[in-house]
Image: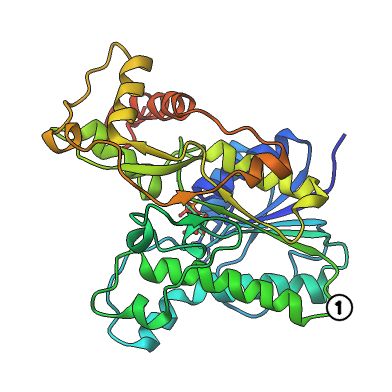
């Protein structure tokens, strides 16, 4: 039996592909948007029977007008993840953040005008909509939860001392803010909105990439450096994110809510390496750096991601589960490097 039809934007991306897998496993009919025929072909090779549509300019006002017509649910996943730091001008900054913001408003607007069957839209936002990790993570008394919003402004995000992820973070926060405003301003909106706001998402690729990149690459320094560097990560396992995205369509309690997704809280690089060594006893791992050995338990802000369990009933995956899946990818198709090893 096949259930309702779901539109997934950015279906070929890391999180998009896992979302499609979870939807298909739950018997949904899926229509995925991608930017090119090549990307559609590689997605269809992984998911036979998947429907695809090409949307190559997500900032165009009519970008989603056709693809929303026949669907009941929308998972809006597409957005660029980029690092930049200072901007030359506010105009240049605005151009960089436009795809995330405009595409979000475009899909909400298309669904309102053309999507008579659309019941729910789930927007992939980010922890950056709740906070600036770079500025706030060391505030040990701070609790970040559903009600928190990032205090970082457009001016700070484009200033000479901006952090590399400030512009991306601003784009995600502003896209989400404007999405809630849009819903509040339009009385004729017939669907509900939910946002899913992960910390750094890690896991294996479903669609092989030429090299391990983006947030999937954040664990590489642990496996490929001469010494494991100091530090650690707030981490969300990609299957947990996909599970939240699909469950949010199914539970009415998700409507109007913002779900922070963080599977294991803060995981230090030492904890990651212990897990890798336990799960892959035959592999060699770099030694811990002196700084990491001396790191101790850092005093950090609390990122409260418990709503996922309370409202959606989802139990988070362990660090070991993530590490097993990641190691199987890294030592398998990638041959223990960040380059895909061709058969
Ligand atoms: P990927 O880069 O793997 O996927 C991004 C997807 O968006 C791809 O399909 C990409 O298409 C598409 N896309 C990017 N820019 C554009 C554009 N200008 N026009 C059309 N399509 C575009 O990233 P992730 O899967 O990691 O991220 C997916 C979503 O999750 C994003 O919204 C991101 O902000 C959010 N997120 C990710 C986190 C993470 O840790 N990875 C954490 C929190 C939120 P193409 O392949 O053609 O470039």
Q: Return the residue at label 1.
A: 188
Q: Quadrant of the N terminus?
A: top right
- Can residue 211 be seen in this snapshot? no
Q: Quadrant of the C terminus?
A: top left
Check disc 1 and report its element: helix, strand or loop.
Answer: loop
Residue in view at x 82 percent, y 68 percent: 115
* Residue 149 percent across, percent down from the top left: 53, 67
Q: Is residue 333 above or below residue 308?
A: above
Residue nearer the viewer, 34 or 6: 6
Q: How many marks?
A: 1
* Residue 244 percent across, percent down from the top left: 65, 44
Q: Is residue 39 above or below residue 89?
A: above
Residue in view at x 85 percent, y 38 percent: 2
Residue in view at x 45 percent, y 38 percent: 208
- Can residue 283 be seen in this snapshot? yes
Describe residue 201's horizontal placement relative to residue 71 as left or right. Answer: left
At label 1, counting other C-alpha atoms closer than 10 Å, the crowd grade (few under 14, some 14-19, many 20 or more) is: few
* Residue 11 percent across, percent down from the top left: 59, 51
Q: Is residue 238 above or below residue 334?
A: below
* Residue 319 percent across, percent down from the top left: 45, 29
Residue in view at x 33 percent, y 60 percent: 134
């Amino acid at each position: 039996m096949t259930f309702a039809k779901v539109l997934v934007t950015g279906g070929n991306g890391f999180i998009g592909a896992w979302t499609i897998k979870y939807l298909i496993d739950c018997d949904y009919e899926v229509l995925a948007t991608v930017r090119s025929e090549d990307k559609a072909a590689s997605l269809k090779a992984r998911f036979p029977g998947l429907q695809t549509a090409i949307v190559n300019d997500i900032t165009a006002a009519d970008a989603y007008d056709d693809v929303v017509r026949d669907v009941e649910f929308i998972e809006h996943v597409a957005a660029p993840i980029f690092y930049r730091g200072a901007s030359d001008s506010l105009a240049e900054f605005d151009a960089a953040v436009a795809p995330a913001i405009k595409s979000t408003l475009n899909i909400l607007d298309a669904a309102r005008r053309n999507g008579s069957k659309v019941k729910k839209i789930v927007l992939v936002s980010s922890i950056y909509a709740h906070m600036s990790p770079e500025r706030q993570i060391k505030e040990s008394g701070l609790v970040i939860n559903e009600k928190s919003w990032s205090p970082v402004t457009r001016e700070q995000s484009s200033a000479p001392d901006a952090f590399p992820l400030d512009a991306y973070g601003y784009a995600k926060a502003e896209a989400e803010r404007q999405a809630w405003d849009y819903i509040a301003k339009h009385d004729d909106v017939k669907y509900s909105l939910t946002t899913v706001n992960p910390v750094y998402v890690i896991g294996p690729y479903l669609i092989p990439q030429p090299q391990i990149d983006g947030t999937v690459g954040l664990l590489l320094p642990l496996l490929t450096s001469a010494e494991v560097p100091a530090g650690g990560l707030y981490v969300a396992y990609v299957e947990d994110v996909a599970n939240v995205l699909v469950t949010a369509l199914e539970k009415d309690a998700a409507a109007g809510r913002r779900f922070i997704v963080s599977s294991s809280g803060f995981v230090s690089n030492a904890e990651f390496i212990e897990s890798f060594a336990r799960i892959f006893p035959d592999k060699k791992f770099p030694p811990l750096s002196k700084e990491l050995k001396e790191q101790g338990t850092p005093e950090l802000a609390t990122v409260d991601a418990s709503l996922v369990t309370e409202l959606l009933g989802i139990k988070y995956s362990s660090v070991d589960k993530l590490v097993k899946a990641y190691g199987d990818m890294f030592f398998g198709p990638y041959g223990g490097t960040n380059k895909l090893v061709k058969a």
